[in-house]
Amino acid sequence: MSLTVLIGSLAAVFALAAIAWLLGMGRTPRIADAEQAERLARDAHSGFVPTDAAVSRDGKAALVAGRDGDFVLLREHGANIAARVFRQAPDIRRDEAILTVATGEKLFGDLRLDLGEADAARWSERLAGGHSEVTA
């Protein structure tokens, strides 16, 4: 292999990597705020009317409550946001500022939301219709 071919190949690889970076490929999605979480929940669940949303401080997950008592859980999944719909309050566990929502799905997994102490307490109380557990 000649030096010219090697340099040309490396330049092509770096050019493709730069294009991918500029297009935002490979970035992990984040949920910026409650408004975005509500929009994503409406997109994921036809007829869903959000009333409240809790977004984890790291933006990796959100819990959105609906008008009819249903809930949509959102979480990052590769380069996308995945959603799961619950017709009733899911089981939860609160450990101070962390709210863990049990989905019962191995592929989706349990959802950990770092909401801060006050919001975690408020959502824990709101979801008490499901089975909730508070640990300190």
Image (spheres, grey):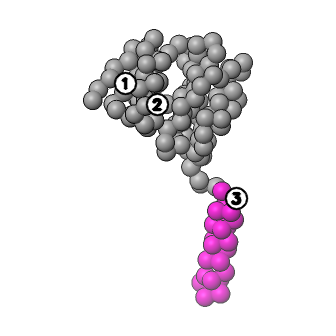
Q: Which residue is mark 1?
A: 93
Q: Residue at x 65, y 37 (%)?
A: 36
Residue shown at 43% from the left, 14% from the top: 128
Prevailing secondary structure of the magenta residues: helix
Mark 1 is on which residue type?
Answer: Arg
- The amino acid type of the residue labelled 3 equals Leu
Q: Nearer the viewer, residue 122 or 93?
A: 122
Q: Quadrant of residue 114?
A: top left
Question: Which quarter of the figure is the N terminus placed in?
Answer: bottom right
Give percent across and percent down for residue 59. 53, 43
User: Which residue in the protein does label 2 denote?
Assistant: 119
**Snapshot quadrant of residue 97:** top left
Question: What range is drawn magenta here?
Answer: 1-24
Q: Is residue 25 visible?
A: yes
Q: Position of residue 95 (x, y in %)?
A: 33, 30
Judged left or right of residue 118, residue 17 is right
| Front residue of 80 and 1 | 80
